[in-house]
């Protein structure tokens, strides 16, 4: 017990469960040479300033009735013409341009028609279908359905109609080209799943997370993995705390900590569980979590399991984040108005559906200003961003010491499985001894551990070659070329420069099946995403670029997508018909690939 208390105190309160936390320090009385203000005056000052900010520069004056409302007072010189502020253009601005009221109405009408047709088919089937009649009789007899009616309806009448475009199995390593297993479906399309025919389709891989190409047959990593598999077997068949920790697991965690520049690291066998099992250990009742609205479901599940209070801020909107932080500190807990024990901000390095990087510099500034903690999920950014692959911190010039909890996964750039929690040693040891993964989950496979160690050595240059740096440069060049080429052809492409995640907006959910099937016909393996992974009107095609792609292959993909985009009419960035194309010269001197054949 004493050692646990020491660990908690060593980290300055992140592990503390006592009411005294750092958040309330921001509302203490100001001390200095000037006049001192009471806590009430400070709170009132913050409230008035916030309301002036939210009112666009107008002063909000209390009406004295105690109902929280007030009258708006125009500032002096309100009639004068003011210079408009320049604001960075966001995805929401682009969405507003494309999604005019007519287009939104058409998209929603499509959903309504599909649901209406589904209900009509259900009614007709219930008249003559014995199976549905028996199901209805069972429900009347008191046996509840295992699946909720709404979910069952969505699965049968909407998802199952296009299930052939999802979950396509492959029969090869996830390199730049993959073998997609051909499938066919017979019978009722709302009840039968497609089955494999035994044939394969050779496709250009634009869907895997294999950002650095290390997940395929690598000359350095693969032989070491095969040797480890022969020496240690495929599994430890035991939990980490019960004989499942090998010398390779210890070496892996030390290598991860060294690569990240942290004191210590703890590795999970599953990337999703890294968030969902760790967040409940760091937050509970009396904790406020402030989460980006586009955070991954593993974060959402972890927050729900923690029992902490949560507030969501608009994606990458620093003004909204600061507003929430200030209100949380001034008002405290909504029922008791006591200070929060701690406030934790949770963000991602690269958002997997947006391709955007987090505004880490601004978030670190706010975190320090309001004495909050920062939890950074680098699932898609670690190994893919930065000069040496050390993630978004290196990319944006932020010190690792400014991040309280570092999280990442090995399923993308490292070509393996699992995830890590890194940071101060006291924090990591607390997570190691308190996490269910240490006691109830089988330790990571030794071959997967060796893949992580070997890939880290390649990326960091510890293998004695410059392959890691070359791969990072190639990934950056490939990503930027592909994104610019699609934009130049009129596609509405999201994401930041250098990000290997390239989302292409389709908006219409009805276009998802056509796009996926046309791409497969043209030997392109892509991922289409729609509701509920995105909003109803924000369906998209998510493309992941790899360093394993050659520029010739990317040029081929752009030309094919250009034709498919014309056929499906998804070039929403085109202003006046066919816009004038500007020639994009890719790096490396590649100019023509008309002779390229499918591999």
Image: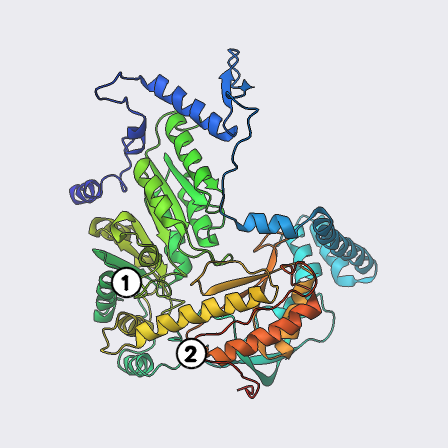
- Residue located beneath label 2 in the image: 588
Please tell me which of labels 2 and 1 falls first in the chain. Answer: 1
Whether residue 348 is visible to the viewer of this picture, yes or no, is: yes
Q: Identify the secondary structure beneath mark 1.
A: helix
Residue 158's disc is: none
Q: Report whether 95 appears left or right of 363.
A: right
Give whichever of 445, 20 is nearer the camera: 20
Residue 164, given in percent of the width and then of the height, sits at 64, 71
List x then y, in percent, for residue 23: 31, 33
Q: In the rendered view, would you say 520 is above or below 113? A: below
313 and 307: which is toward the camera: 313
Q: Nearer the viewer, mark 2 or mark 1?
A: 2
Tag 2 secondary structure: loop
Residue that numbered label 1 is attached to: 240
267 sits to left or right of 567: left
Circle 2 packing at 10 Å, graded few (<14), some (14-19), many (20+), is few
Which residue is depicted at the point 50% across and 39% down?
Answer: 85
Q: Is residue 210 visible?
A: no
Name the image quarter holding residue 365: top left
Q: CA distance from mark 2 to mark 1?
A: 47 Å
Q: Who is closer to the viewer here, 45 or 408?
A: 45
Q: Is residue 55 above or below residue 268?
A: above
**As drawn, 161 above or below 67:** below
Q: Are marks 2 and 1 in contact (CB under 8 Å)?
A: no
Mark 1, Cα crowd under 10 Å, few <14 / some 14-19 / many 20+, is many
Could you tell me which residue is drawn at 38 percent across and 22 percent down? 43
What percent of the width, then of the height, locates residue 203? 55, 80
- Compared across the picture, whether 18 is left or right of 211 comes to left
Identify the image quadrant of residue 533. Answer: bottom right
Q: Position of residue 19 (x, y in %)?
A: 29, 31
Tell me which corner region of the image, top left, top right, bottom left or bottom right, holds residue 113. bottom right
Which residue in the rendered view is the most extreme toward the front?
80
């Amino acid at each position: 017990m004493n050692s646990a208390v020491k660990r908690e105190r060593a980290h300055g309160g992140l592990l503390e469960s006592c009411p005294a936390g750092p958040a309330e320090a921001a509302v203490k009385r100001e001390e200095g040479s000037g006049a001192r203000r009471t806590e009430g005056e400070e709170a009132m000052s913050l409230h008035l300033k916030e309301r002036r900010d939210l009112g666009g520069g107008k002063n909000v004056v209390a009406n004295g009735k105690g109902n929280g409302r007030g009258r708006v007072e125009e500032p002096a010189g309100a009639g004068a013409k003011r210079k408009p502020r320049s604001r960075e253009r966001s995805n929401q601005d682009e969405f507003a341009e494309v999604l005019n009221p007519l287009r939104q109405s058409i998209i929603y009408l499509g959903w309504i028609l599909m649901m209406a047709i589904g209900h009509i088919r259900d009614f007709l089937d219930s008249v003559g279908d014995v199976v549905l009649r028996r199901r209805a009789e069972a429900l009347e007899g008191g046996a509840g359905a295992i699946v909720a009616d709404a979910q069952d309806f969505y699965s049968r009448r909407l998802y199952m109609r296009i299930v052939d475009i999802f979950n396509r199995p492959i029969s090869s390593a996830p390199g730049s080209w993959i073998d997609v297993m051909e499938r066919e479906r017979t019978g009722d399309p709302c009840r039968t799943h497609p089955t494999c025919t035994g044939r394969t389709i050779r496709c250009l891989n634009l869907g895997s997370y294999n950002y650095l190409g290390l997940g395929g047959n690598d000359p350095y990593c693969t032989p070491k993995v095969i040797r480890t598999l022969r020496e240690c077997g495929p599994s430890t068949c035991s939990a980490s705390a019960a004989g499942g920790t090998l010398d390779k697991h210890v070496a892996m965690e030390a290598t991860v900590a060294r690569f990240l520049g942290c004191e210590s690291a703890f590795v999970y066998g599953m990337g999703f569980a890294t968030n969902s099992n760790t967040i409940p250990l760091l937050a509970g009742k009396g904790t406020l979590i402030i989460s980006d609205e586009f955070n991954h479901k593993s974060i959402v599940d972890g927050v729900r399991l923690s029992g902490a209070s949560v507030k969501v801020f608009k994606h990458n909107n620093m003004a909204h984040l600061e507003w929430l932080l200030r209100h949380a500190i001034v008002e405290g807990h909504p029922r008791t108005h006591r200070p929060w024990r701690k406030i934790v901000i949770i963000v991602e390095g690269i958002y997997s559906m947006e391709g955007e990087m987090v505004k880490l510099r601004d978030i670190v500034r706010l975190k320090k200003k309001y004495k909050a903690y920062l939890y950074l999920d680098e699932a898609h950014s670690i190994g893919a961003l930065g000069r040496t692959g050390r993630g978004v911190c290196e990319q944006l010039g932020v010190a690792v010491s400014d991040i309280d909890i570092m999280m990442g996964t090995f399923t993308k750039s490292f070509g393996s499985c699992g995830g890590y929690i890194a940071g101060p040693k006291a924090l990591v040891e607390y997570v190691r001894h308190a996490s269910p993964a240490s006691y109830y989950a089988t330790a990571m496979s030794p071959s997967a551990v060796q893949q992580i160690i070997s890939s880290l050595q390649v990326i960091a240059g510890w293998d004695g070659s410059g392959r890691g740096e070359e791969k990072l440069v190639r990934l950056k060049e490939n990503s930027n070329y592909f994104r610019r080429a699609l934009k130049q052809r009129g596609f509405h492409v999201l994401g930041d420069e250098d990000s290997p995640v390239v989302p292409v907006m389709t908006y219409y959910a009805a276009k998802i099946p056509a796009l996926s099937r046309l791409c497969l016909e043209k030997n392109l393996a892509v991922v289409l995403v729609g509701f509920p992974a995105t909003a109803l009107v924000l369906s998209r095609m998510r493309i992941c670029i790899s360093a394993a792609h050659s520029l010739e292959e990317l040029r081929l993909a752009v030309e094919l997508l250009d034709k498919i985009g014309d056929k499906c009419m998804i070039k929403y960035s085109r202003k006046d018909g066919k816009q004038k194309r500007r020639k994009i010269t890719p790096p490396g001197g590649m100019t023509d690939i008309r002779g390229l054949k499918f591999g």
